[in-house]
Amino acid sequence: MERDGERIEITISSRFENIELVQVVAEHLCENAGVDEDGSHWVGMAVREAVANAIKHGNKLDVRKKVDATFELHGSELEIKISDEGEGFDPETVGDPLNPQNLMKTSGRGIFYIRTFMDEVQYSFNPGEGMSLLMTKDLAKGPGVASGKM
């Protein structure tokens, strides 16, 4: 079954306990689109890392600042946008966690996971508005799609 035009928007305060809510929505949306449990899990992990980064690094754990998550499903393409109210950063300056000199560092792993689990990843910064991360995943290609459900 192919769904089109499904859109879900969530706004949370910058509290780590809210991460799971956004992750569950992502996984549920994937499962409803016919993605198997593993595929749904990996998309959920990318969302979890993106929201955690928005809370910790973007909004600096300021509970007065919000994180917006928007999920749009068009055919088999899932587009996820995570936005914070922070000052932004250059993702190219984040060290590669696979580089031997970075193996013991904890920074950079979230971005690595996001890039690994999603098909396309784009960052944008708008002064006064915050940082946004746009991730897309073609749910019909590659591993993670349950056969016969799409």
Image (spheres, rainbow, N blue to C red):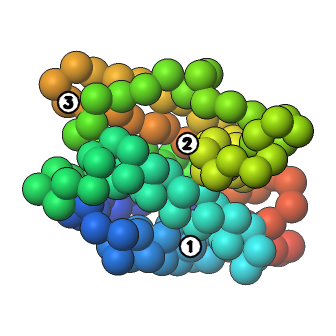
Instruction: Point out residue 127 in the picture as x, y percentages from the top left corner.
Output: 22, 20
Q: CA distance from mark 3 to mark 2?
A: 19 Å
In the image, farthest residue toward the left: 64
Rendered view: 90 above or below 19: above
Residue at the image position 43 percent from the left and 26 percent from the top: 89
Please indicate, yes or no, whether residue 64 appears anywhere in the rendered image: yes
Precedes in sequence: disc 3 or disc 2: 3
Q: Which residue is mark 3?
A: 129
Tell me which amino acid carries mark 3.
Glu
Residue 27: give its label: 1
The answer to whether marks 2 and 1 mark residues whose Cβ atoms lie closer than 8 Å is no
Q: CA distance from mark 3 to mark 1?
A: 28 Å
Tell me which amino acid carries mark 1.
Glu
Precedes in sequence: disc 3 or disc 1: 1
Rendered view: 122 above or below 140: above
Instruction: Point out residue 9 in the picture as x, y percentages from the top left corner.
Output: 29, 58
Q: Which residue is mark 2?
A: 135
Q: CA distance from mark 2 to mark 1?
A: 14 Å
Instruction: Describe residue 71's horizontal placement relative to residue 65 as left or right.
Output: right
Give the quadrant of the C terminus.
bottom right
In terms of depth relative to the viewer, which is nearer, 52 or 138? Answer: 52
In terms of depth relative to the viewer, which is nearer, 24 or 150? Answer: 24
Tell me which amino acid carries mark 2.
Met
Give the quadrant of the N terminus.
bottom right
Please indicate, yes or no, whether residue 29 appears anywhere in the rendered image: no
Residue at the image position 55 percent from the left and 27 percent from the top: 91
Disc 2: CA contacts within 10 A as few (<14), some (14-19) or many (>=20): many
Residue at the image position 19 percent from the left and 54 percent from the top: 62
Residue 70: give its label: none
The answer to whether marks 3 and 2 mark residues whose Cβ atoms lie closer than 8 Å is no
